[in-house]
Amino acid sequence: MKGNYLIHIAMNRLYHFPLSPFCRKVRLVLAEKKVEVELVYEHYWKGSIELINRNPAGKVPILRINDLTLSDSQAICEYLEETITDFPLMPEEPQDRAEVRRLVFWFDDKFHHEVTSNLLYERITKKIIGLGHPESKNIKLGSDKIKNHLDYIGSLLEERKWLAGKVLTLADFTAAAHLSCLDYTSDVDWNRNINVKDWYAKIKSRPAFRSILADQISGFPPPSHYTDLDF
């Protein structure tokens, strides 16, 4: 079976940065599909020759699996979905799959540019990679924009059990990957919408989330509620 073949391959490696939402999305999919990987912390901003050889774009995540080297979080997730039939994260109906893809793009593009890059990258990533102090105007913009996004997520959950419909999908993991990074910096007001808080609590309690909640960035401790499954 394809799924079993992948599960038992030794020395799968994921080159990642712990507070990258794109890396976290891949980690969640790997964990949900029971694929064991060795996590390799990649200082992607240094642009090493080894990194460029693995991915000419110079970005993470990069997955080494089955003698393949895969890059780009969405390409990796689609490969895993297509080769591991167990634990599906895409629904069966074409219209439902289209909705999942729409939401994945929403979070990886719109949410990322309006919120994640203005909060997480300003507060932590810039300091780690040596790009100076955070820009207060960007933090203010991100803080304003996240309110709109939380309201939008809440509106989806008024009609749906999960973000894209009746079942857990890649859309949920994509959203949770971004929000978990922002939760690390205390930038999510979980009291703004009870539907969003309850949805995230369900995601946060899944076994796939355990390694993410164990992440620690030196010099940047997470808030006390970060690992609390009941907030």
Image (cartoon, rainbow, N blue to C red):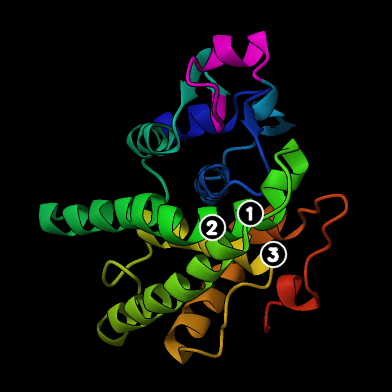
On screen, 85 above or below 202? above
The reply to whether the magenta stretch includes residue 123 is: no
Q: Residue at x 56, y 9 (%)?
A: 53
153 lies left or right of 181:
left
Label 2 – label 1 distance at C-alpha: 6 Å
State whether residue 223 is above or below residue 88.
Answer: below
> Are the residues at dot 2 and dot 1 in contact (C-beta closer than 8 Å)?
yes
Residue drawn where x is 88% and y is 54% of the image? 219
Please name the amino acid that badge 3 sits on.
Tyr
* Residue range of the region highlighted in magenta in the rendering: 47-63
The image quadrant where one finds the C terminus is bottom right
The residue sitting at the right extreme is 219
Q: In the image, 58: left or right of 129?
A: left
Disc 3 to disc 2, how far (Cα)?
A: 14 Å
Q: Which residue is mark 2?
A: 118
The residue indicated by pointer 1 is: 122
Q: Amino acid at mark 1?
A: Glu
User: Badge 2 local density, few (<14 within 10 Å), some, or many (20+)?
Assistant: many
Q: Where is residue 62 drawn, in percent x and y?
A: 55, 27
Q: Earlier in the sequence, mark 3 or mark 2?
A: 2
Task: Say if residue 5 shows up in the picture.
Answer: yes
Mark 2: amino acid: Asn
Residue marked by disc 3: 184
SS at circle 2:
helix
